[in-house]
Image (cartoon, rainbow, N blue to C red):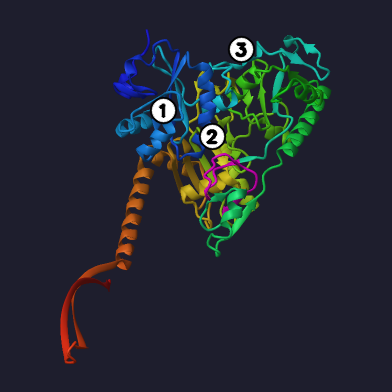
Amino acid sequence: MTFDFTDLLGPVLDGRNGKVATSGIAAGKTHIAFYFSASWCPPCRRFTPQLLELYSRKSPELEIVFISSDREETAHNEYFAKMSWIALPYADRDRVKTLREKFGVMGIPQLVLFDARSGEVVVKDIRSLVEKDVAGHHFPYPERHLRTILAHADLIDNTGAVVPRASINGETIAFYFDAPSFLPEMWGRCGAGCGNWASRGTRYSCDQEQFNACESCYATIKETHDSSHTFTAHPPKDLAAESLKVKESLVKAYQAAKVAGQDLEIVSISFAKTAEEHAAHAASFPWLTVAFDDKMDVAFHMAKLYDFAFDETNVVVVDAARNLLNINAMLAFKKEQPFPFLPPYFGELSESWISSNHSILYKQAIVVFPAATQTAEEIAAIEATLTAISNKWNLATTNYVDESCVVVDGKLFEPDFILFTATGTSQMTDFIKRVSGTKAEAVGPTIVLSCYPTREWYSVEVANLSVEAVEHFIADFKSGKLKEEKDANEVEKAAENAEKTASLKEVKQFEKVTTVTTTTTIGKGEDGSIFKTVVKSTAVEFRPFIVEN
């Protein structure tokens, strides 16, 4: 018995060789995926070949439905011709909009995975999982808790000798995610031409128009772009050097813990691609490493659990019961914080997108920007206020169950908001400033409420930051007052812009112009006589004339 997807997709879909009845697409399958994509989207064009590879291996159990965001049917047809699966008819644009809203599709590509039997969503977006696993070794990406993952992990020491799993029982563990080599740092979307959403290397930001250019596009546009505009170069982090710094801080903490008799063990999760590379990587550590597996089973599921990429260094600390203590412990080790390396009361956004073990990408957040001329004492006062808020909201609680849920008074607790200061600068702080309308010349602290999942940002400048000011701002957000005020301001701005445009607009009118042309020709006949011919022609046209308001 399988689920009938007709209510979601309509009765008929486009197949490779004609129409397909929606009621039968789940027959014999274990999973259905909705692929939200478009031919004009560079990340989609890069991802589609990877998805084709997965589909070639998993099509007996997986069916994919392409849901197009193309702007023209011709482009849709050309893109769909490169695919091996079925598609929602392009003409059903209203259904596309409904599906995007229903499944929270804020950007593409997005691949929503369903259970073919129940019709329930298994994973909201498996794109990043497919990118890590195009061979489909781990499909359909079941949820695994840390204890389950570790139960299948073989451990080795730096000589390659197998170590019993029981040797780490009762220990606080720092999991060290690392790779033997790194690509240049990925920073995001190039807005200068290529549109690559996974640009790496040096980032060039236009100081006037607030867009980023990759190295190749910058080399092209710097000759043609507005010459009055300036660009700031942002060299990429040296990820190998960053990895080495983290390793050095871990070694120092590890040695100190052994001297102090603290129950700390470090376990490396290596993203090495070959057995030889993995062996050399493991030999460089004084602690244990998860043994090599050509399917990278433990590395894959650990990275999935904590939402990590394969080309970045991270450290996660769990307690002896394998409950999460700090998902962003790399900062704790680099700053030489004491065992057991707990997270701070609030995050610094220029250093990390994570606070209280939650990312600003997935959780509502309060971000406080200091005034343009804030003193060290005033910044300290901001930090004291956020510490007070963190204590009041129980964000400092460190008793976790499994991966994310905090226990407060015996009950599971999920914070509504996480907290950040933004005293430094980064791509994220610049982005939050811009979308929230935070003033560069603010004379007091600015509170920003960020709701990244719904693309909402609000800001208010205050004379003095206080717990009451933050909570009042949140109350206005929850009541809808902030949105109402923002919508009203946007309507007012739109009216002002329309009025300004109208005052400058050229109003074209037409006048009727009649032109009479007289042509006189004097000639000589064959008999020698002289004659004159007069021809009159009249032309009528309508010529525009311009009146300035």
Q: Residues within 10 Å of mark 1 (few under 14, many from 20)?
A: many
What is the spatial separation of the Cα atoms under label 1 and label 3, in whole angstroms? Answer: 34 Å
Q: Position of residue 482 (x, y in %)?
A: 38, 44
User: Most prominent secondary structure in the magenta stretch?
Assistant: loop
Q: Secondary structure at mark 2?
A: helix
Residue at the limit of the structure toward the top, as seen here: 1
What is the spatial separation of the Cα atoms under label 3 and label 2, in whole angstroms? Answer: 33 Å
Relative vertical location of residue 291 with respect to residue 201 in this rendering, above or below: above
Residue of label 2:
46
The part of the image, by quadrant, that contains residue 1 is top left
Mark nearer the viewer, 1 or 3: 1
Q: Secondary structure at mark 1?
A: strand
Relative vertical location of residue 381 with respect to residue 419 in this rendering, above or below: below
**What is the magenta range?**
187-206
Q: Which mark is residue 66?
A: 1
Residue at the limit of the structure toward the front, as seen here: 527
Residue 335 seen in the current view = no
Q: Position of residue 417 (x, y in %)?
A: 49, 34
Relative vertical location of residue 273 with respect to residue 419 in this rendering, above or below: above
